[in-house]
Image: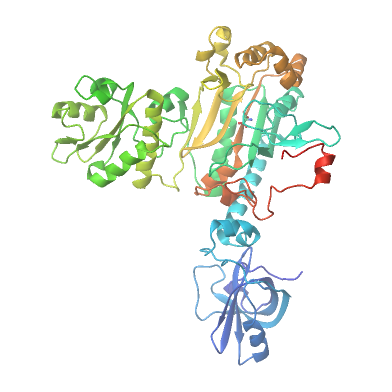
Amino acid sequence: MLRTNTCGDLNVHDVGKIVKLAGWVQKNRNLGGMTFIDLRDRYGVTQLAFDMEINAELCDIARNLGREFVIQIVGEVIERSAKNLNIPTGEIEINVSKINVLNESKLPPFTIENKTDGGEELRMKYRYLDIRRDPIKNNLILRHRITSKTRNYLDLKGFCEIETPYLIKSTPEGARDFIVPSRVNPTQFYALPQSPQTFKQLLMVGGMDKYYQIVKCFRDEDLRSDRQPEFTQIDCEMSFVNQEDVLNTFEGLIINLFKEIKGIELSQFPRITYKEAISTYGTDKPDIRFGMKFVDLTNLCKGTEFNVFNEAELIIGINVKGGSSFSRKDIDKYTEFIRSSQINAKGLVYCKYNEDGSFKSSVDKFFNQEQLNNWSEACKSSPGDLILIIAGEESNTRNALSELRLLVAENLEIRNNSEFAPIWVVDFPLYEWDKESNRYHSMHHPFTSPKSSDIDHIKNNPNDLIADAYDLVINGNEIGGGSIRIHNKEIQKIIFEHLGFNQEEARNQFGFLMDAFEYGAPPHGGIAFGLDRLCSVIGGKESIRDFIAFPKNNSARDTMIDSPSYINHEQLDDLNLKLKN
Ligand code: ASP
């Protein structure tokens, strides 16, 4: 071995030992008589000391070592006079007797320290250097621990990890596919899987009973800052289960991860129906770390001369605890926010409950103190609080107030990253109506079963059907989602009809699944968790990119390897592809 210990190992108990270390030069400090080097590896930093008086030649070599040179040293562990109690190795240093330069390094384009001077773009281009920094390195280690604990838990529960293919068949349902041309089958294409959904169902038909896979999935969607074209799922499926069994099994997984990784004991997760989530929080991924639940003020607010309210389909408000101290400027900022093109609400009405018991609102011209008092009672506000109200068309108003709720909470710093509030959202509608294509779309996916109580009237009433589908939300982030599946060929056929597939289309795309359902498909259901997001939530950070070793940027590019890239004519010819001029 090139080393006897790592750079994170040694402490006062090792004083007197002769050790061999290897790593990168993080810092080199020449203090005249003494030179100190911080030597770094994955495990930590150890200080190396060189004394001019003891060995001038060695000291000279040390002084000339540049940042990120890779060196190996031999020396004696000694107790430091100036101790650094912030790091585990901070009470010792190595009195070096031998240096071996294993490799030189160009000056790195940014400092490899916890706080770096490198911007995101530069760090992405030199990701291998970024990974040397603690924040990224620790995220990758956290990710490893999460996957390893996940495997342990699922193994213990009898799940079997099985790989499914990456080169599959394109289907127009869901997001856009990434396409791979087939050279040996000219003019034909594979698609990369958006998820192993149909394969895991086929594994259930195959009798595998409990499957999981930590698996890459690919979706060619327009990018948002928290989306990656390739991402990882913890994908799971079980046979002979109902919704309750799936929720319990995977609630157990999440509880186990938080306990093992964060030392946090989560109690039983609350559940909320989709309908309740939308009416209480305006979203199907509610952040329940704080209150500010929606209060419907539609009836209380109508019937004055204030036409904005009279004409509104829905009038809803939230009570902001202690918000009466918000300045005019604060409120103007919130008004601006909800009027912005991304939110697109008309305006914001406020009502302050002053400490002296009186009310001050932005619509005092139209509402008297008694009416404002009624609002305040409905919102359960107390002196010192502030009610914020939005009115308009139903779904947009809910969405606007939901965004406003999050922003206010953010500014009040009550979205605390070290607090974790999981919640199951259940009873999703089976379909949503898509105005553009003028047809139903599956809210989850076409293999999701309607609730057994709904199956009897499945033929007449697609709009009202509720699915056996569920999402796990933590702190306002969708962490996972799944459903009980259809295992009956006739029902699957009706669902495809509702979704506007004619028989031939259904056969072409999903014939293999329908065929499989003819051979004794067991009742089954499952779930998939977004691993990247789960890591970022457990890690208490916003960005998922920092938890992916080699992520893509906002334009879906990997700037380090410079991909995607053009391919040459021979390759195109081989694939029977021509570029459009
Ligand atoms: N395949 C689904 C998805 O990727 C998850 C599931 O239903 O298990 O969203």
Please state the horizontal and vertical placement of residue 510, each as a whole percent of the image.
72, 21
Q: Would you say 365 lies left or right of 390 here?
A: left
Of 141 and 305, nearer the camera is 305
Of 172 and 495, nearer the camera is 172
Please state the horizontal and vertical placement of residue 259, each as a whole percent of the image.
54, 45
Up/down of 306 relative to 532, above or below: above
Q: Would you say 505 lies left or right of 11 here?
A: right
Looking at the figure, which quarter contains the C terminus?
top right
Image region (quadrant) for ligand 1: top right
Residue 162 appears anywhere in the view: no
Q: Residue furthest front?
A: 581
Count of numbered labels shown in the rendering: 0
Up/down of 10 relative to 349, above or below: below
Looking at the figure, which quarter contains the N terminus?
bottom right
Q: Residue at x 63, y 13 (%)?
A: 497
Q: Residue at x 58, y 80 (%)?
A: 36
Up/down of 550 relative to 295, above or below: below
Up/down of 522 relative to 413, above or below: above
Residue 146 appears anywhere in the view: yes
Please state the horizontal and vertical placement of residue 116, each as a whole percent of the image.
53, 64
In which quadrant of the rendered view does residue 287 lie?
top left
Please state the horizontal and vertical placement of residue 562, each as a whole percent of the image.
68, 53
Q: Residue furthest bottom?
A: 53
In which quadrant of the rendered view does residue 257 lie?
top right
Q: Would you say 557 lies left or right of 577 here?
A: left
